[in-house]
Image (cartoon, grey):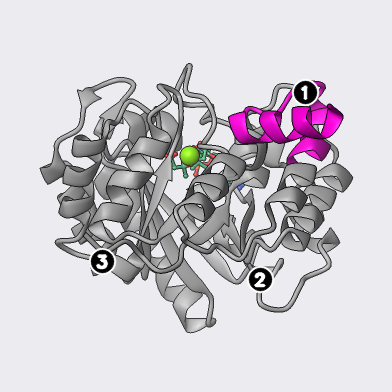
Amino acid sequence: MSLPSRVQIIDVGPRDGLQNEKQPVPAAVKIELVHRLQAAGLTEIEVTSFVSPKWVPQMADNAQVMAGIQRKPGVRYSVLTPNAQGYAAAVQSQPDEIVVFAAASQAFSQKNINCSIEESIERFAPVVQAALAAGIAVRGAMSCAVGCPYEGDVSPSSVSHLAGLMKQIGVQRVDMADTIGTGTPLKVQRALEATLQHFDIDHICGHFHDTYGQALANTLASLQLGIWNFQSSVAGLGGCPYAQGATGNVSTEDLVYMLHGMGIPTGIDLDKLVDAGAFISDFLGRKPNSNVAKAILNKRAG
Ligand code: HMG
Ligand code: MG
C-alpha cells in the first residue's frame, strides 16, 4: 500500500465553522482568523459564503470579510455560491474559486437550498460556466454522500449520480462530504469509489465532519485509496445549520498531527496553527474542539 506523498488541506473553518456559531463574530475577527491561517501555512482557505442572509445571517458580512483580507500570494481563497445571485455578489470580491453545493439526498437538498437535486444542478450550470469563463476555479460540494439526517444511509449509486451531474456541468473538482459524520471507513471508501467513476483521484477532496469521532479513521481510509486533498476546520469549528446535531469538521490540528506523524507533509506549521485555533476559541469563550490543540496547549501551560 502506498500512501500519498503529500496532502493538501483546505481550511473551511471561517465558512463551515463560523456559519454555525450562535454568537455574532465580527468581520474583523474572521479576517484575523484568515490571516492567522495563512501565516500558519494554509494555502487554501474557504472564507465565506454568498448565501441568503435570511437563511444564514452569520455569513452576511461576506463582502466585508473578503475585502478585508490581505491576500498572500499562492493562497487560494474560496467562497460558496448557491445560485446566480450569490455568484454575482461573490465575483465582486474576486474569489480564486467558487463552490457550488448540492446534496446526494433529496431531503437534504430541500432543507439546505430549498430545491431538488436536479433543480440545484440547473441553477449551478450557468454559474459554473460564468466562473470558468472568468478564470475562476469551480469546486462542487456533495453533501450527505454517506448519510443524511432525514433519509439515513445514502447509497453509493446516489453519490455516483450526483458526481456525474457535477462533471456534466463543468465542475472541476468535488468534495465528498460526510455532513453529519456518521460515516465509517468502509462506507467512506464506497462513496469515494462512486465519486471516482466521474472524477480522478487528484480532483476529489474528503470533507469529514467529526460528529461520531470517525473523521480521522475516514481520512486514513481515504489516504489508502490515494485521496490527497482534505478539508478540515481549525479548532474543529462548525457544523451545518440544516443538519441538526452535526458538529464541526475534523480539526485541522488533529489532521495535521496525524499526517505529519505518518511522514506526510502538509506545509503547515502545527504550532502556528494551534495559535490560530486558540485565537478563535478564546474569542468564542471555549477550548478548541481538537485533542491535539488541547494537548499542545496543556503542554505549553505546564
Ligand atoms: P430561496 O428562498 O429558495 O431563494 O433560497 P429565492 O431565489 O426564492 O429568493 C428568496 C430571497 O432570497 C430573495 O430575497 C432573494 O433576493 C434572496 P427577498 O426578495 O425575499 O428579499 N436570495 C439571496 N440573497 C443573498 N444571496 C443569495 C440569494 N439567493 C436568493 N445567494 C437559497 C435559496 C439557496 C438562497 C437559500 O436556501 C440559502 O441561502 N440557503 C443557505 C444554504 C447554506 O448556506 N447552507 C450551509 C452551507 S452548505 C454546508 O454547510 C455543507 C458543506 O459544508 C458540505 C457538507 O458538509 O455537507 C458545503
Ligand atoms: Mg460541511
In this picture, which residue range is highlighted in magenta? Answer: 277-302
Q: Residue at x 26, y 64 (%)?
A: 2
How far apart are labels 3 and 2 at the CA level? 25 Å
In the picture, residue 145 is in which quadrant? top left
The tag earlier along the polypeptide, 3 or 1, is 1
- The amino acid on which the numbered mark 1 sits, given as a three-letter code, is Gln
Task: Specify whether 25 is left or right of 160.
Answer: right
Q: Position of residue 178 (x, y in %)?
A: 36, 37
Instruction: Give the labeled residue for mark 3.
Output: 167
Q: Is residue 260 above or below residue 198?
A: above
Q: Observer-nearest residue: 138 or 252?
A: 252
* Image height of 264 relative to 144, above or below: below
Characterize the local packing of mark 1: few (<14), some (14-19) or many (20 or more) Cα atoms within 10 angstroms: few
> Crowding at label 3, few (<14), some or many (≥20) Cα neighbours within 10 Å?
some
Label 3 vs label 2, nearer the camera: 2
- Judging by the rendered image, the residue that carries numbered circle 1 is 23
Query: What residue is at 42 percent from the left and 45 percent from the top?
Result: 207
The total of numbered circles placed on residues is 3
Identify the disc placed on residue 75. Answer: 2
Quarter of the image with the C terminus in it: top right
